[in-house]
Image (cartoon, grey):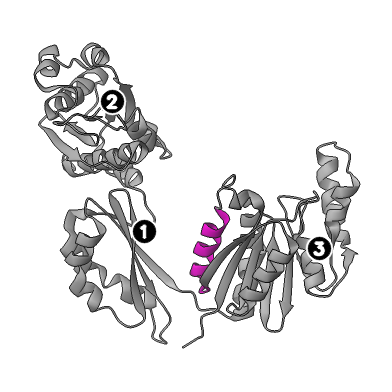
Amino acid sequence: MQQVPNAEIITIGDELLYGQVIDTNSAFMGQELGKLGVRVRQITSVSDRGTEIVQALDAARERADVILLTGGLGPTKDDLTKHVLTEYFRSELVLHEPTLQHVEAIFARYNRPMLEVNRQQAFVPRVCQVVPNPMGTAPGMWFEDRGTVFVSMPGVPFEMKRMMTDTVLPRLQEHFHTAPIEHVVVQTVGLGESFLAQQIADWEDSLPPNMKLAYLPSLGAVRLRLTGTDDGQPDLRGRMLALLPALRERLGTHIFAEGEVKLEEALGQLLRERGLTVGTAESCTGGYIAQRLTSVPGSSAYFQGSIVAYHNDMKVKELSVKPETLQAHGAVSEATAREMAEGLRQRLGVDVAVAASGIAGPGGGTTEKPVGTICIAYADAHQTVSRQLNFDRGRQLNIEYTSTAVLNLLRLSLPPVVK
């Protein structure tokens, strides 16, 4: 069985440590390295200080076969990575003519003068192999030292991703002769992580030694990722897929998709297959459900519109909620949510409609209806279904959790395909 290379990712920049920039690079690199068969063992973030970068490099080389760095390659004084690496590998900076021509062409294309600091970006350590940067001016650098591969790339995500895809990943695969790790993903919703684990415990316990299951929870949903490593036997992926029918038998409708598919994407496919249109009536979610549905390319084929009826007067005026319903049950009630969904369906002329009304917090709760009391509903021509939910995880998480619950109610309530 082939040895799996270990990797470490080092992100460089004070802006990452201060939380001014979110590190999306590590997530992308981890996913792509996993597909390649390279296992990420650690992700480290360090400041724009030479001594700390060196310390991170020294520590990483003790545990990793390949070290990927992002950040600190720009033209300003705080961009130290190239200079630190030059000293680290006891080298010197030399002009790389192809990079200089590339930088000059970029400035000429935009009819901008090229400053000396921009020209300096074409200087690289003599001992490195240059990694072209078709999307920017700072080249990447590939070093090999005492059996370890070091790759330095810009921190700008679209520049780094293009470098990884075009050059770094193919070169890593060739260098390590990797046999890719296989991943099979099953998406579930409506069952918490612990309950999910209990329900499939026997299935998980029976997995072969070279296959491992990971639980990746989010609000109201859990991704199950089955990872298989090469065991010398043929058709690893086929053997992994053969395990799924038994998983489906245990989880049933809690599975909404296989692969890297979001709930709203799976819903869009169901609506297309059934030829149905949908709309949303929202109060506490403020349009968030509509935003999720319309985030899917091509959603105009089935999504008609939304009414955010935050105030009770708007519920009456725009969604035909009866004043006596509000008086008797309140805005946060299954009765109101049902009338919101039914009224929206009539108002927009859609086949199906969903609604949400609740107390997202942090204020507004009562003893009878505390913060986190949410009522949701679904309506079509034949039925109206409603649910009351109770949870409080803070305002934003309450809104996000509610949107997942509504989309799942929509998924489970849709009429079957007409044949």
Occupied quadrant, residue 111: top right
Callouts 1 and 2 close, C-beta under 8 Å:
no
Where's residue 158, x and y in %?
63, 50
Instruction: Tell me the amino acid under the disc marked 3.
Output: His
Q: Amino acid at mark 2?
A: Ser
Percent position of residue 169, x then y: 61, 67
Name which quarter of the figure residue 315 lies in: top left
Magenta stretch bounds: 24-39
Q: CA distance from mark 3 to mark 1?
A: 42 Å
Q: Nearer the viewer, residue 83 or 290?
A: 83
Q: What SS does tag 1 mark?
A: loop
> Residue 83: which disc?
3
**313 relative to 349, above or below:** above
Q: Is residue 342 left or right of residue 307?
A: left
Q: Which residue is mark 1?
A: 259
Q: CA distance from mark 1 to mark 2?
A: 32 Å
Q: CA distance from mark 2 to mark 3?
A: 55 Å
| Residues packed near mark 2 inside 10 Å, few (<14), some (14 to 19) or many (20 plus) | many
- Indicate the position of residue 345 as horizontal and vertical percent values: 21, 23
Q: Is residue 140 magenta?
A: no
Q: Main secondary structure of the magenta part?
A: helix
Badge 1 amino acid: Gly
Q: Secondary structure at mark 2?
A: loop
Figure disc tally: 3
Q: Which quadrant does the C terminus fall into?
A: top left
Q: Is residue 30 magenta?
A: yes
Q: Is residue 27 left or right of residue 301?
A: right
Residue at 62% in and 64% down: 10
Q: Which residue is mark 2?
A: 283
